[in-house]
Image: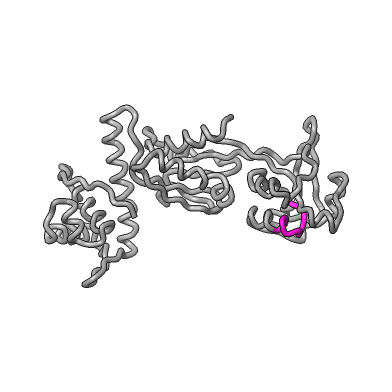
Amino acid sequence: MGIRTFITEPHAGGGMELRTMRTFVAIVELGSFVAAAKALGLTRSAAGKALARLETHLGTRLLHRSTRTLSLTTDGQYFYERCVQILADIDEAESSVRQDNPEPKGTLRLTVTSAFGRIVILPLLNEFLTEWPELEIEISFTDRIIDLVEEGFDLGIRMGDLPVDSLMVARRITRCQHFIYASPAYLQQYGTPENHHEIAAHQRLIYGLQPGSGVWQLTGKEGLEVAISGNRRLRFDSGEAIKDAAVAGMGIALLPSFLATDDLHHHRLVKLFPNLSGKDIAINAIYPNRKHLAAKVRRFIDMLVMHFPS
């Protein structure tokens, strides 16, 4: 856990003071009242009283205390995460006022789809962190639908068309195409289909567990539309699992190009009918609709746009 610079000026507003919030965050991140008090220029007693006042104000216990350790309660964990975000936003707001081109600071909370995140986004993070040393990143790899605001994420990377939502902004960063792939071992054992009609007689690896899933809608030269159906005995809810099954010789798969690139390069997969492709899928950066976009979000989106030229 990174240690931020702690500011000790009192907050002039009513209710909970920012100084109290910063004291709580310092206690959590430094692991003791003594270390937090030293970082903030307080006495150990003052830090302890600040936490006690905060717990009284909130009406809940934030930390479990023992003679040797401190640990967050469930309420404490939630409140800590929100405090970190609030303090980072305040620091960034101050920087925005002081200079025209603020350096991103704090923690960027990012959620990405599992396969695209692991294969495409993850390799970009080291360069981004090197360029912006004051920034930390928390990243969640998941294919489930995320409420960015409710779960406290700054930015999401999602594939496919998105529903219209006035609370969210979507910016397309790139598109990907789907192609048909099979392993050399599968083709050697079962034969290579000579045209797309013959695929129906092969074992197809299907994405989607719903009863109606399984028809591949493809487009050929001059916009010719092709529908491929047939065998659908193996169905998955993971694109990566389909790719692994295809490499293992379990069937023919329709995969996004980014997922198959490495296996194609190392001859673990073969592209069939390269003139046939699935519908272009948009890959979007989505973020809450705010008047002022945080520098950490703007910089990350700029990096993605540069990496994926139009």
The answer to if 250 sits in the magenta stretch is: yes
Picture quarter containing residue 234? bottom right
Residue 185: give x, y in percent of width and height. Answer: 79, 57
The front one of 133 and 198 is 133
111 versus 131 height, above or below: below
Q: Is residue 54 visible?
A: yes
Position of 121 with respect to 29 (left or right) is: right
Residue at point 54% right, 48% down?
Answer: 117
From where the camera sits, is residue 209 visible? no
Q: How many numbered discs, if any?
A: 0
Q: In x, y percent, where is residue 161?
A: 60, 40
Q: Residue at x 48, y 52 (%)?
A: 140
Which residue occupies the foreground of this view, 252 or 54? 252
In front here: 262 or 192?
Answer: 262
Where is 12 relative to 184, above or below?
A: above
Q: Residue at x 23, y 58 (%)?
A: 27
Q: How far across and how far down the image is residue 112, in percent?
A: 52, 48
Residue at far front of view: 266
Q: Residue furthest top?
A: 100
Q: Does residue 170 appear to the left or right of 108 in the view shown?
A: right
Indicate whether residue 31 is drawn in magenta: no
| Quadrant, the C terminus | top right
Residue found 86% across the figure and 46% down from its top? 197
Magenta span of residues: 245-253
